[in-house]
Amino acid sequence: MRQRTFVFFTCLFSLLGASAALGDNDHYKQHQKGERFAFALVGDGPYAEDQEPKWDETIRQINRDRDVRFVNHAGDIKGGGEMCTDELLVRRFDQLQQLRRPLVYTPGDNEWTDCHRTSNGSYVPTERLDFIRNLFFPYPGYTTGGRYMRVQTQANAEGFEKFVENTLFLKERIVFSQIHVVGSNNNLRPWDQLPDGDLPLEREAEFAERSAAGVEWLKHTFMVAKKLRAPGVFLTIHANPNFNEDRTSEGLRGGFNSFLDVLEEQVADYGKPVVIAHGDSHFFRMDTPYLLPWYYNDNAATSEENRKIGNLIRVETFGHFDNHWVKVEVDPNDDAVFRVVPRVVKANL
């Protein structure tokens, strides 16, 4: 019944001409209110079958919070050593559909990039990525979850049709953007546990195409924010992009440098509060990251040699064995815009 209802409303929106093209300002006019609201930020879980009941409890607590308007999952719906079977991925997807609010999701490395591992079933990662896209984005331009929410998708832009997961929406004049950037060095780490070894041409081609799409979506995000004079921007990626590592380290930063270079440029030019949220390294934190790490610049004489941007805040979700959530309170009329509140689920301690 739910799918039938969704298809009916999808057809109705189409007939009314409500499907917005990339950059169509009419898509945003309804959101110009500026009232306070909150949403939930989660990620990196469940990581094992025995953690599924704990995630059920986390979901129940989120559902009970009437302030929460939507739930943002920063990727990794399974552990790095779990099998990448259809059955497991569908089960975790179905579990997340217990959320009563819209579910906004960006893929993690565990559900596709790392599926080449023997412990994961030695899948070709690009095949698993196709499965994840079909599972979590069955109706491009809409979220899943207990309530559907309309979003803009990069798949509507010519040349980017496959990137259904790069999405954007407004809530009370705040721009929210989800960009597919994953761990394992953003898929530059070799698929070395496949039966016949790595597939470097396929892997590098996937990285190059997705990385370019992500950079374009990042630029589009800030174009929208500046054009509409949005009070703040909230970005979500999966990967910890290793802000604090030397950018010349190909194994740690090679997959993220192009994204971080554009991020630095866009955030500085925008000049208002920006949060970049991620998972991947499994502990809750909030900081203002160095874009040139201080400990690689011990003898720095100027701030340019130990560079950070004051209006960029990094928030990492709880993850792995810490089955909790983060409540983000948003006030478009406050200079700081975002207030980050960790919510520890006592039953999961």
Image (spheres, rainbow, N blue to C red):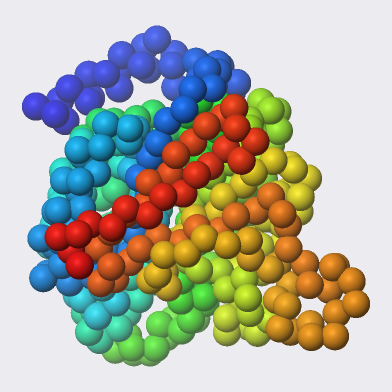
Q: Is residue 235 left or right of residue 102?
A: right
The image quadrant where one finds the C terminus is bottom left
The image quadrant where one finds the N terminus is top left
Q: Is residue 274 above or below residue 184?
A: above
Residue 74, image x, y percentages:
39, 56
Judging depth in this view, the residue of 271 and 108 nearest the camera is: 271
**Outermost residue, front side:** 346
- Residue drawn at x 70%, y 67% is 291
- Residue drawn at x 38%, y 46% is 327
Q: Is residue 325 left or right of residue 234?
A: left
- Residue drawn at x 42%, y 73% is 281
Judging depth in this view, the residue of 92 and 332 nearest the camera is: 332
Judging depth in this view, the residue of 17 and 47 nearest the camera is: 47
- Residue drawn at x 32%, y 36% is 68
Q: How many marks?
A: 0
The answer to which quarter of the image holds residue 11 is top left
**Outermost residue, top side:** 16
Q: Is residue 50 above or below residue 157?
A: below
Residue 75 visible within the image: no
Residue 229, image x, y percentages:
69, 28
Residue 262, image x, y percentages:
71, 56
Residue 40 visible within the image: yes
The answer to which quarter of the image holds residue 129 is bottom left
The answer to which quarter of the image holds residue 310 is bottom right
Residue 212, image x, y percentages:
61, 57
Q: Is residue 109 above or below residue 140?
A: below
